[in-house]
Image (cartoon, rainbow, N blue to C red):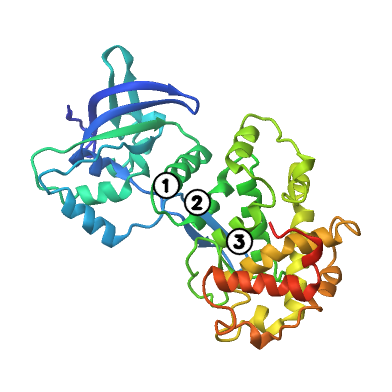
Amino acid sequence: MKQQSILTNKFEESFPCLKLRQPIGDFYIATIDAKTLCQITYADVRRMEQEDREFEQYLGIQRPLSSSRVKEIGQYVNTVDACFPTAIILAINGKYVEYIEKENRMILRNFADENNEDQNLESSRIAQVLDGQHRIAGLQTFSGEQFDVNVSIFVDMDVESQAYVFSTVNLAQTKVNKSLVYDLFELSKARSPQKTCHQIAVALNSYPKSPFYSKIKRLGTATAGKFTETLTQATFVEALIGYLTDDKVLDRDIYRRHKKPKIDESKSEKLIFRSLFIQERDMELTDLISNYFSAVAERWPTAWVTGGEGLILNKTNGFRALMRFLKPAYLSLRWKAEIPSKSDFLAIFNKVNINDDDFTVARFNPGTSGESNLFKTFMSDSGLEPNHKLF
């Protein structure tokens, strides 16, 4: 029930609520009417804030609202059989929450201390949405009498856990931009294959002398003012992560339990970079990837660096073919050096009989067939095919 106060913008409301305990910790399930839910919630959208030319900071965890999706939901909530059976997930600062366990009730307020107005909030900033922002936006057009929404409420949840809940829910259940999901691993304190691959992508994208400098779309879409980005972060991460682990969820869980995954030597020719990953030699792994693609850039400067019109080498298909070829190329050099040099890789690429202007969709069709054809050409021309299994 809402109560009056001398504070003109005071908000206080209670509702039925139950406390749950799961491995992630305690949280609450409750029902909140749609009008109140729309009033108290906000979404923290993932975005870039550039403080100067050299420094870019990425903040927030949510994806931007899709106006078409909001319109679709807005129409749906006003149909006769509208239903949201799954919970909307919220995170709330504990200063603005009171849980009365004996009564199974929760009270939300927009003030922490009635005598200290500096801690007051706008009612619209009480609860941060971790999952369900499109449903909440759609509910703003609800014109019926009552629409109760089941919610899961996390109190005093740290930003790493917020990002993980958002990532897990959306990657498993909805079509969400995978580059955004991988970018959120930056917020994780624990080590994981996902975080390591993300950090390598960011490092290579940021260093001016890197073959990937300004080529990677961090959030999966082109950055305003940049015209050199040809690969999404998801494309980069998913091509690399299979060389570090064959169970990224398990590895992450092991690290979250303050343990370390094991190295299985029987898989060393499949998981070629696992030992580097487990030994936390991320800088060396970054150098190795840089050396490999620097050799690509030197062998095919037009196709890779400038990416002439119609050329596919520095785009998704070309990159994936190169990442597939990285395994046999690396295995052929590992006896010589654990971190092969650019010249080591260049000696292999010099055997490949393809010119810059050959990397076209006319020769290598769009889709997986073109990628496979390019990979097989690398294998055949380099002479590695008889010595190594493809996969």
* Residue shown at the point (23%, 26%) measured from the top left: 15
Q: Residues within 10 Å of mark 3 (few under 14, many from 20)?
A: many
Q: Quadrant of residue 6?
A: top left
Q: Secondary structure at mark 1?
A: helix
Residue 177 picture location, percent across and down? 45, 57
Residue 263 picture location, percent across and down? 76, 39
Q: Amino acid at mark 2?
A: Val
* Residue shown at the point (74%, 59%) measured from the top left: 327
Report how many numbered discs are placed on residues in the image: 3
Residue closest to the far right: 336
Tell me the number on the disc at residue 236: 3
Query: Which residue in the protein does label 2 denote?
Result: 181
Query: Which residue in the protein does label 1 denote?
Result: 170
Which of pointers 2 and 3 indicates the residue nearer the eye?
A: 3
Query: Is residue 229 visible in the rendered structure shown here?
Result: no
Residue closest to the far front: 386
